Image: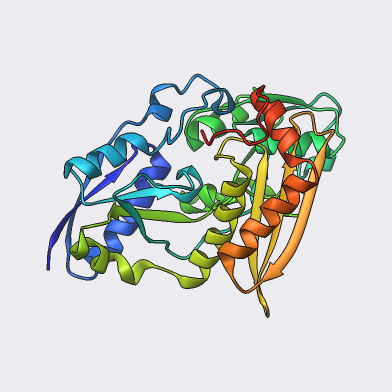
Amino acid sequence: MARFRLGSRGSQLALWQANHVSELLQQQGHTISIEVIKTTGDKIADVALAKVGTKGMFTKEIEEALAAGRVDLAVHSLKDLPTELPAGFVLAAVPKREDARDAFVSVKYSRIEELPEGACVGTSSLRRQAQLQALGRSLELVPLRGNVDTRLRKLQAGEFDAVILAAAGLTRLGLSYAIREYISPDRMCPAAGQGALAIETRADDIETLETVKFLDDPATRAAVQCERACLNTLGGGCQVPIGAYAVPVPEGLLLHAVVVSPDGQQIVREQSSGANPEKLGIEVGRALLRRGAGLILSAVYGRDTALPQQP
């Protein structure tokens, strides 16, 4: 058996993910050490993610450590991983996905519909903000950064009436009791890859590639491949108002995708099914563009181009 060095961000959730993968590898007899790496996204924690616009803001420094041989594999939240990996890297495994839905968390209220007009809702995601606006509620939406504990602490302190978080992160940290409502993907379409983990390695590191292969879940990989193909076709990254969610159906996968203007006034939805994940994702992305999604996205970035670059 071999020794492997695993690279991870240092947040509580990132370390849960790293330790989870480490334990699975240790069960196979391997020795694992974890190196915590601070990323650009961690260094600018006081800036709203949608305003950062940095490609690979949560992955770049970890990939640099991979390239330098300081670590042998990296564990990411898949939704943070750019749809096109830099040359020399490969998505070696995608473990079975956790719940992909967004979660409504509140001390006073049990569901979104109970929020009064003007209620203060915290979320770090432009995608969530836009879809909340599209529900037609008069809410005060406030950017919310920090780890899960920090966000829940601010909620408990009364700084917010509610916060919207990924259900997967809460579940992984043993905090699912805080969830008041699991938001249906029909109402709030998840981010591409939400709830899934990504194990990244060097493309030429055959030993590590073979070692982590058992962690790959084919059904999850197919679904996220489809979602990421759609996202890539739209030219979007993890911090744009795009949702993409694929589920298994008898004919293969059913993909639902949405592009929403930040004010919620313009919303373009598309849904289709097919057997080829990559092809389906591209087809749905192109259909969204034909229906005006590119104009929404170019307005988000304040550019003339219909396809904003991936942050």
Percent position of residue 294, x then y: 71, 38
Q: Is residue 30 left or right of residue 145?
A: left
Q: Is residue 263 left or right of residue 106?
A: right
Q: How many marks?
A: 0
Regarding residue 296, the answer to whether it shows in the image is yes
**Which color scheme does this rendered protein use?**
rainbow
Percent position of residue 229, x then y: 57, 55
Q: Where is 15 relative to 48, above or below? A: below
Give 300 or 164, whichever is nearer the viewer: 300
Q: Is residue 222 left or right of residue 298?
A: left
Regarding residue 183, the answer to whether it shows in the image is no
Q: Where is 128 relative to 189, above or below? A: above
Percent position of residue 84, x then y: 45, 47
Residue at 64% in and 63% down: 280
Residue at 74% in and 49% down: 288
Residue at 64% in and 48% down: 102
Q: Where is 18 relative to 118, above or below? A: below
- Name of the residue lying farthest toward the top: 46
Percent position of residue 137, x then y: 85, 33
Residue at 64% in and 66% down: 247
Q: Where is 250 relative to 233, above or below? A: below
Q: Quadrant of the N terminus?
A: bottom left
Give 47 or 208, whichever is nearer the viewer: 208
Give 75 or 110, whichever is nearer the viewer: 75
